[in-house]
Image (cartoon, rainbow, N blue to C red):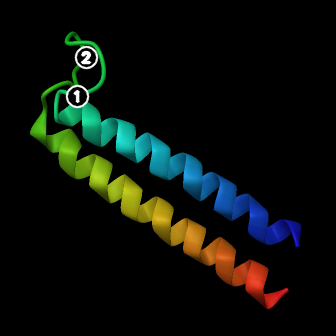
Amino acid sequence: MREGKIPVIVGIIIIIFGWIFHLQGQSIVGPESSFMYSNPDWITYGMGIIIAGIVIVGVGIIILKKN
């Protein structure tokens, strides 16, 4: 049972970080002195990180359902 919870928790944390990076790239969150602030590359990076987090959560859910 525990094997599936860890990927779900890690995936959720990764999704949160990806969302923060995405918002920083859009100039919504963060200090203006940050290299991520208002940088369109970080919009794309944030979305990629969010997708990776969703995949990890999905793997965790599959592991939970198998047990």
Residue 2: x and y in percent read 87, 66
Look at discs 1 and 2 and give the one toward the viewer: 1
Q: Nearer the viewer, residue 49 or 26?
A: 26
Whether residue 16 sits left or right of residue 36 in the image: it is right
- Closer to the camera in the image, 26 or 35: 26
Residue 66 against residue 64 in the figure, above or below: below
Q: Residue at x 75, y 86 (%)?
A: 65
- Residue at the location (77% across, 63% down)? 5
Which residue is under mark 2? 34
Q: Height in image: 54 above or below 31? A: below
- Image position, residue 12 (x, y; %): 57, 53
Residue 40 position, x and y percent, is 11, 40
Q: Earlier in the sequence, mark 1 or mark 2?
A: 1
| Type of amino acid under label 2 | Ser
**Residue at position x 25%, y 16% in the image:** 34
Question: Which residue is the site of mark 1?
Answer: 28
Mark drawn on residue 45: none
How many numbered circles are shown?
2
Disc 2 secondary structure class:
loop
Crowd around label 2: few <14 · some 14–19 · many ≥20 (10 Å): few
Question: What is the C-alpha distance between the residues marked 1 and 2?
Answer: 12 Å
Q: Is 2 situated left or right of 43 in this image? A: right
In the rendered view, tell whether residue 18 sits above or below residue 24. Answer: below
Badge 1: residue crowd in 10 Å (few <14, some 14–19, many ≥20): some
Q: Which residue corresponds to the image point at 43% horizontal and 63% vertical from the top-left? A: 52
| Amino acid type for the residue under numbered disc 1 | Ile
Q: Quadrant of the C terminus?
A: bottom right
Q: Position of residue 49 (x, y in %)?
A: 38, 54
Q: Is residue 5 left or right of residue 47?
A: right
